[in-house]
Image (cartoon, rainbow, N blue to C red):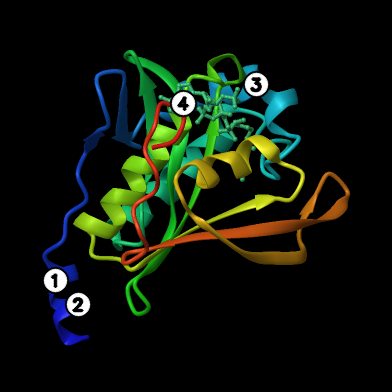
Amino acid sequence: MADQTAARVTLRYPDRIPVDDEVELRLVAEGDEVEIFRFTDANRAYLRQWLPWVDATLSAVDTRGFVERSLEQVRVLDGFQTRILYRGEFAGMIGYLYHDWKNLRTEMGYWLREDLQGRGVMTRAAKALTDFALANLGLNRVEIRAATDNRRSRAVPERLGFVQEGVLREAAWLNDRFIDLVVYARLRDDPAPPTGPRSL
Ligand SMILES: CC(C)(COP(=O)(O)OP(=O)(O)OC[C@H]1O[C@@H](n2cnc3c(N)ncnc32)[C@H](O)[C@@H]1OP(=O)(O)O)[C@@H](O)C(=O)NCCC(=O)NCCS
């Protein structure tokens, strides 16, 4: 465990993670709140169905708070948030909610512009961050949690060969009610997922 701590001290998160010839991840930076807020606002009705923070995000000042927390998260090596670029254009967000260096695990969260769904952008981005966590950061476990009724979100870890581990009953408060969350995880030693045009 001492070695893991030593490795962490020298760790620096990258500014960008290339995914393929269409998709790229860029670490959230100063000033990104304008763009992130613009697309949050434009996708408000769709995003609020599943994301509890949308209703409280009323201006770029609120998104500025998210950017500041993201910069602090990077400073203390507790994970990072990225803007997803699809063909050079803002497509959505994906990031690690935390990096638990003691237990070598992390959890990912994400959202995509409504009009860019259905192209595999999120599956590709989530695969890149899963691989980055397991291969580059030396973590052992990557988790994704999704509302039981959020079929599109659940399909992302399912496409990537994550194992469905269980249901956390009434684990989140969303739109005036408790919802159940399904927990998916991928471990470093899990077998590689099947490959094909619709699974990665
Ligand atoms: C959850 C969310 C990111 C899923 O978006 P999505 O577009 O369904 O996911 P992907 O970008 O991976 O695209 C998958 C689709 O593209 C297709 N696809 C096309 N090319 C593909 C490729 N190269 N690789 C994988 N899938 C591909 C898949 O078959 C799938 O199509 P289908 O929806 O007809 O089954 C999006 O619905 C969203 O942001 N929702 C609101 C916020 C939210 O719920 N966040 C998650 C909270 S836990």
User: Does any atom of ligand 1 lie closer than 8 Å to the CB of label 3?
Assistant: yes
Q: Residues within 10 Å of mark 3 (few under 14, many from 20)?
A: some
The answer to whether the residues at label 4 and label 3 have Cβ atoms under 8 Å apart is no
Discs 3/2, front: 2
* Label 1: which secondary element: helix
Q: Amino acid at mark 1?
A: Ala
Is 61 positioned to the left or the right of 19 in the image?
right
Residue where numbered disc 3 is placed: 43
Above or below 47: residue 145: below
Residue 159 x, y percent position in the rendering = 50, 41
- Which quarter holds ligand 1? top right
Q: Amino acid at mark 3?
A: Asn
Residue where numbered disc 4 is placed: 120
* Label 3: which secondary element: loop
Q: Amino acid at mark 2?
A: Gln
For the residue pair 78 and 131, the one nearer the viewer reads as 131
